[in-house]
Amino acid sequence: MLRNYKADLHVHTCLSPCAEMKMSPAAIVKRAKARGVHVLGICDHNSAENAPAALEAARRYGVHVLPGMEVTSSEEVHLLALFDALEPAGELQEIVYRHLPGENDEEVFGMQVVVNADDEVLGFNRKLLIGATTLRLEEIAEIIRSKGGLAVAAHIDRESFSLIGQLGFIPDDLILDALEISPDLSYGEAARRYNPTLPLIHSSDAHKTEEVGRCCTTFFLEKVSIEEIKKALREQEGRRIVR
Amino acid sequence: MTVTEVVERLGLRVLTSKGIGDIEVTGGYTCDLLSDVMANGRMGNLWITMQTHQNVLAVARIKDLAGIVFVNGRRPDEETIRKANEEHVTVLGTDESAFSISGQLYQLLEKP
């Protein structure tokens, strides 16, 4: 049976150097549950290493987590990649790591903490996760698609690290599933501004616990899966976004 | 000063093969954000950037720029060069930094 699922598809954890230390996967899932969020997309910068903990925490609290990441392309465009399971997310991570130069400086950028579902620290990621990969935007989108994932241009209205900001407009040969807009921009205003040919979604881009679920997209789906969300974005078989 | 003269004076590489139009260079604009170039680039400007994404061609055309100068030895892919030839966008290159080449262009245009 089709029903509404409230989804926040862009949430960072303490693995992202710019996110709060309190943003453990367990804390995020708890906050999502309290706010009535059914689906969380875990999208740390260029890494999915906290996705296993998020999935485990999600099982305990009855929230659905889609593992993913926010990949930075060589053009410095942020692209969200979301998957049904850990395996494809891990495969993307492997490719991203091979194309991500540099080492993190905790003093400058912040700590990159890998944790488990019980908030225990498992280690620190040493890569420069805040940096840009050497992968072209179209290349990343193609990899995501080939692994059955959802590819979403992140916060297109932001001046920096956004598809529109960096590249002025959406390239013809770039295949994406959706465009994400920031919480403070309304769908109506975004539609006027960009006249988009792709569906718009709202998410929180939460870096702090209080931001989790502050802005969501409600999908009308049979169950939570990438395939169902893709159908909703394309308005197929009764699936749709509830505005 | 025309594009040809600027190319000679600054020792720029010409990456497109269609020959450069003898357009008058009205100034320079140095930026890697295409949205900003679309907002602030002026007709006849030479655009100095390290952003090699194919979208630069459309921006150069929309804004009637005199050409694009890729810095730090950066080079767009062959497909972009091919399209630049097709669309008559002059694509130039240099091993110098954006700062250095902007300074030199400024000297050239402002103090002839």
Image: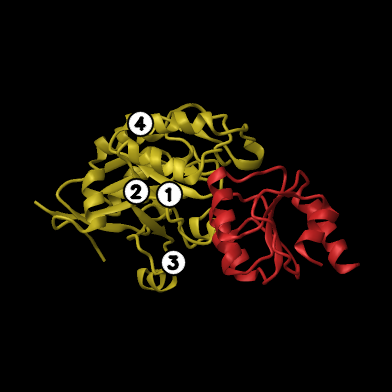
Please, which chain is the residue tagged with disc 4 on? A
The type of residue carrying mark 1 is Thr
Numbered tag placed on residue A209 in the rendering: 1
For numbered disc 4, what is the local secondary structure? Answer: helix
Quadrant location of the C terminus of chain B in the rendered image:
bottom right
Determine if marks 1 and 2 fall on one subunit: yes
Drawn side of residue B102 relative to residue A199, left or right: right
Which residue type does callout 4 highlight? Answer: Pro
Whether tag 4 and tag 2 are in contact, CB under 8 A, the answer is no
Cα distance in 3D space between marks 1 and 2? 7 Å
Q: Chain of mark 1?
A: A
Q: Are marks 1 and 2 in contact (CB under 8 Å)?
A: yes
Q: Earlier in the sequence, mark 4 or mark 3?
A: 4
- Residue depicted at x 44% and y 32%: A93
Dot 1: element: helix
**Which percent across, then down, holds residue A82?**
35, 42
Chain given the colour red: B
Which chain is indicated by disc 3? A
Image point (51%, 30%), residue name: A97
Task: Name the disc covering residue A52, or none.
Answer: 4
